[in-house]
Image: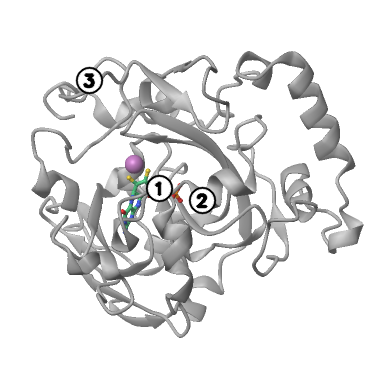
Amino acid sequence: MLIRKAPQIKSSEITSEADYLDRRSFLAKAGLAAAGLAGASPVIAAVASDPGASGRVLENVSESPLSLDEAPNSWRDVTTYNNFYEFGTGKEDPSRYAGSLVTRPWQVKVSGECDQPGDYNLEDILSPHALEERVYRLRCVEAWSMVIPWVGFPLADLLKRFQPNSDARFVRFRTLYDPGQMPGQRRRILDWPYVEGLTIEEAMNPLAFMAVGVYGRELPNQNGAPMRLVVPWKYGFKSIKTINAIHFTRTRPRTSWEASAPREYGFYANVNPNVDHPRWSQASERIIGSGLFAPRRKTEMFNGYAEQVAHLYQGLDLRRNF
Ligand SMILES: Nc1nc2c(c(=O)[nH]1)N[C@H]1C(S)=C(S)[C@@H](COP(=O)(O)O)O[C@H]1N2
Ligand SMILES: [Mo]
């Protein structure tokens, strides 16, 4: 399959021209050398000069042709406006309460229809993978979006190492279950632990990404440390955080949101402006960080990635399989 560069939506269409030019020159001039980031992308460089940024700087991060050519949201937007119900349902709860989560040492259990199952140490999961930056728009099912510069590696590269067999039609991912560390799990908002899943074809698509960082630094806990999925053509809830189990299976997994409200959240959860949520329109989205009176943005089919992923859904009624 031919992979083209992600659609080029000029940032000038979503911010004013002047803001856009300012932002660009800011990015270009940002202090690379000062932060020991010589060779980093402009986006990574930008964060080096953001006084609010924290976390270990990741080395040898390459740029990707699959990145959006758009200025990302601020470090502050990305790390304080979060959904992570294990730490509460308020947008600022995760940044307030996730700090104490212990993500080292960390193990990931790999099981099911594959030839290399086992309990893997995080270091062994991560070490073979070269890191790249992927700037993607995250479109939440709640009808808002922001642009985030993730760091990680293609999900397919990780999954192939476990050698899924021909019965592996789906992959299921699970978040840590530990109510001691994740106080939100003491309330039965969801049937914990958080579970998500993809078809094997979706998981192997080059856009599907395993993130270990954001803005050139290790992921803050509130963003899903030590590793989380990013599936940019689907609603944000598919991008499961703080993963400690991967399971290959013949049958479609029962995912947390689908189980809790099957009329509202489907297994596929592809971004689709033509299929409304039962309680609100999905035709447009609020741009986080753009101010109270900023115009909304029109939601794009598959969040702008139709060219790369529409073939995965040929013959599927996207209204019924929402
Ligand atoms: N384990 C877990 N993963 C999760 C969630 C969650 O509550 N728990 N929220 C999801 C939702 S609804 C969204 S929009 C994204 C938000 O990711 P971010 O906070 O890094 O932007 O994470 C997704 N992954
Ligand atoms: Mo979301």
Q: Amino acid at mark 1?
A: Lys
Q: Amino acid at mark 3?
A: Asp
Contact between marks 1 and 3 (CB within 8 A): the answer is: no
Quarter residue 314 falls in:
top left
Q: Earlier in the sequence, mark 3 or mark 2?
A: 2
Residue 307 can be seen, yes or no: no
- Judge the density around disc 1: few (<14), some (14-19), many (≥20) Cα neighbours within 10 Å: some
Residue 52 horizontal side relative to residue 222, left or right: right
The residue beneath circle 2 is: 80
Q: Is residue 279 above or below residue 26?
A: above
Q: What distance separates the C-alpha of mark 1 from that of mark 2? A: 7 Å
The residue shown at (21%, 52%) is 170
What residue is shown at x 65% (from left), y 30% (from top)? 70
Q: Position of residue 40 (x, y in %)?
A: 78, 52
Q: Give the CA distance from mark 3 to mark 2.
A: 27 Å
Q: Earlier in the sequence, mark 1 or mark 3?
A: 1
- Residue 315 x/y as whole percent: 18, 22
| Residue under label 1 | 91
Distance (Cα) linking label 1 and label 3: 23 Å
The answer to whether the residues at label 1 and label 2 have Cβ atoms under 8 Å apart is yes
The residue lying toward the viewer, choosing from 236 and 293, is 293
Q: Nearer the viewer, mark 3 or mark 2?
A: 2
Viewer-closest of 306 and 102: 102
State how many labels appear. Answer: 3
Q: Is residue 271 left or right of residue 316?
A: right
Query: If you read the primary sequence from the N terminus, does the residue marked by circle 1 or circle 2 appear first?
Result: 2
Which circle, 1 or 3, is nearer the viewer? Answer: 1
Residue 314 in sight: yes
Residue at the far bottom: name it.
105
Is 189 left, or right, of 114 in this rendering? Answer: left
Q: Which residue is mark 3?
A: 276
The image quadrant where one finds the C terminus is: top left
